[in-house]
Image (cartoon, helix red, strand yellow):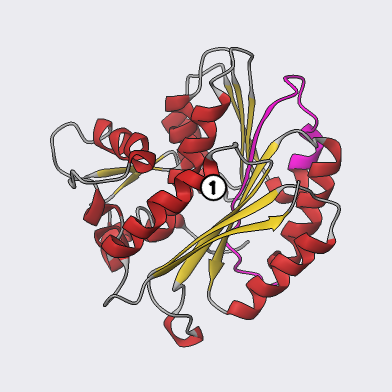
Amino acid sequence: MLSYQHAFHAGNFADVLKHTVLVQILDYLKLKDKPLFYLDTHAGLGLYHLNSKEAAKNREYVSGIGKLWRLNDSPETIRPYLELIKSLNPQGSLLHYPGSPVIAQKLLRRTDRLFLFELHPNQYQLLNSQLKPDKRIKIELGDGLNEGLNLLPPIQHRGLVLIDPSYEVKTDYKAVVSVLAAMYKRFANGIFALWYPVVERGYIQALELAIQKSAIKNVQLFELGVEPDSPSLGMTACGMIVVNPPWLLSDRMANCLPWLVKVLGQDSQGFFRVVQLVKE
């Protein structure tokens, strides 16, 4: 059993990017009245308490959502995400941060369906207690990277698959491409969002090349760096790779990312990337 717990990192700059993109995609999918399917391969918890001993250990949220949520000059793209954070902290103090399950639960409609995988038994139990009762949601104890394929294609024929492993095991960088390609083959009109951390740039270059060599079409990449690449510093950047992205997502992220770099970048060394990785 792997040891990763997102509670130590909740609300950091990586969550800001990941959840900004997630909110944009879900809002886009809701433009049509037809029901949609949401699959989260590595759900984590629904809600993180920022005064917990885990979150307080490194206080990563302070240099992430903590820098953003009270600002009034944010770009339009990021505002729905920030409003959701504020709605979960109505007393005016930043005490709670949502995981992707609660973001999806809050944004999706009664006709939509959510399927969440969580591998760690204690996290699975906590997630169940946080989200129940909700007839829209099914939570499974298991590895969504291996088991999520069995749910595709969904009967709704439209929706989002969020792939967000911890990358504790370096083979995950190859495994996610294999799984993504298999999922795409079954659900070619679905939207897929793959999160990745930049710890060693070589792994990301190989990941991008593997996607380009696959049969997957229409792929965009959005990356946020708070420091220059450096294997000695841990995660200095992260990205979201989106298959079949909403048609305005690239423009909106290109507008939003410079502002995030300005606010979250360390010592003016932040950077961003917006790349059409594979053409339609």
Measuring 75% from the left and 23% from the top, which residue is drawn there?
Answer: 157
Kindly indicate the quadrant of the structure image that contains residue 233: bottom left
Residue found at x 58% / y 26%: 29
| Displayed quadrant of residue 136 | top right
Q: Secondary structure at mark 1?
A: helix
- Does the segment drawn in magenta span residue 2? no
In what quadrant of the picture does the N terminus appear?
A: bottom right
In the rendered view, tell whether residue 17 sits above or below residue 2: above
Residue stretch in magenta: 148-170
Residue at left 60%, top 63%? 2
Above/below status of 218 relative to 231? above
Identify which residue, 22 or 164, lies in the foreground: 22
Q: Does residue 189 appear left or right of residue 255 in this picture?
A: right
Does residue 179 appear in this view? yes
Q: Amino acid at mark 1?
A: Ser
What count of labels does the image hold? 1
Q: Is residue 164 magenta?
A: yes
Can I make out residue 16 in this image?
Answer: no
Q: Position of residue 151 (x, y in %)?
A: 77, 32
Instruction: Give percent across and percent down for residue 33.
Output: 58, 12
Q: Vertically, is 259 above or below 134?
A: below
Q: Main secondary structure of the magenta part?
A: loop
Q: Residue at x 63, y 41 (%)?
A: 245
Q: Nearer the viewer, residue 132 or 269?
A: 269
Check the image and name the residue furthest to the bottom.
Answer: 232
> Depth check: 132 or 111 in front?
111
- Tell me if mark 1 has few (under 14), some (14-19) or many (20+) residues whose alpha carbon lies within 10 angstroms of its own: some
Quarter occupied by residue 35? top right
Residue 148, above or below 33: below
Residue position marked by numbered label 1 in the rendering: 250
- Residue placed most toward the observer, 256 or 237: 256
